[in-house]
Amino acid sequence: MNQEIIAKAEAAIAKRALVPNEGSCANEGYCTVTTIDENGYPTSSTITASKADGIRRLVFGSTLNSDRVNRIKKCNRACVCINSDEYHVSLVGTIEILTDPQSKQDAWYDWLKEYYSGADDPDFCALHFTTERYNLYFIDGEMEDSGTLPKE
């Protein structure tokens, strides 16, 4: 496990997660979540991370009755990709749907007011992604690493 490249990946993820107290993300790169559909095919969608704990955990907000959440209910294996012209971060793990008030509040950010009445909206849920393995690549310095995160 290369700590230098993991630190770079954590900084890249932090740029894609919400900027504290601003309710918006840095304007670079994309974040996608890939889940498995009912026919066994991968399906990706662009999403904003509400929170990040390094490369280990990411939190997203979503619609409880969406296709994405219905796919997760059937298969909780997922991949999160965060990339830009300078890097590619691919995280593989599991994703869980949470509807308790604290988890929903953790996933909430002001921009979501366009879609929901608030964090307590019955159609709003939190998605908690936990990384099991990763593949990281940075053009700067041609740094690359892949591996498995130790269990906590």
Image (cartoon, rainbow, N blue to C red):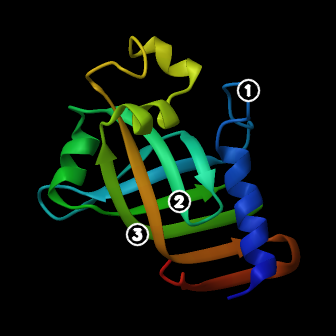
- Is the residue under label 3 in contact with that under label 2 (CB below 8 Å)? no
The correct choice, above or below, for 49 with respect to 135 in the image is above
- Which callout, 2 or 3, points at the residue further toward the start of the chain? 2
Q: Looking at the image, which residue is at 47% across and 30% down?
A: 105
The correct choice, above or below, for 21 with respect to 42 in the image is above
Q: Quadrant of residue 28?
A: top right
Q: Which mark is residue 48?
A: none
The residues bearing labels 2 and 3 have C-alpha atoms spaced at a distance of 10 Å
Q: Residue furthest left?
A: 39
Residue occupied by mark 1: 21
Q: Is residue 138 visible?
A: no
The amino acid pointed to by label 3 is Gly
Observer-nearest of 33 and 95? 95
Please state, as top left, top right, bottom left or bottom right, where the N terminus lies in the image. bottom right
Residue occupied by mark 2: 57
Percent position of residue 98, x then y? 32, 43
The residues bearing labels 1 and 3 have C-alpha atoms spaced at a distance of 29 Å
- Is the residue under label 1 in contact with that under label 2 (CB below 8 Å)? no
The amino acid pointed to by label 2 is Arg
Residue occupied by mark 3: 93
Q: Secondary structure at mark 3?
A: strand
Q: Looking at the image, which residue is at 81% across and 78% down?
A: 4
Percent position of residue 118, x then y? 42, 16
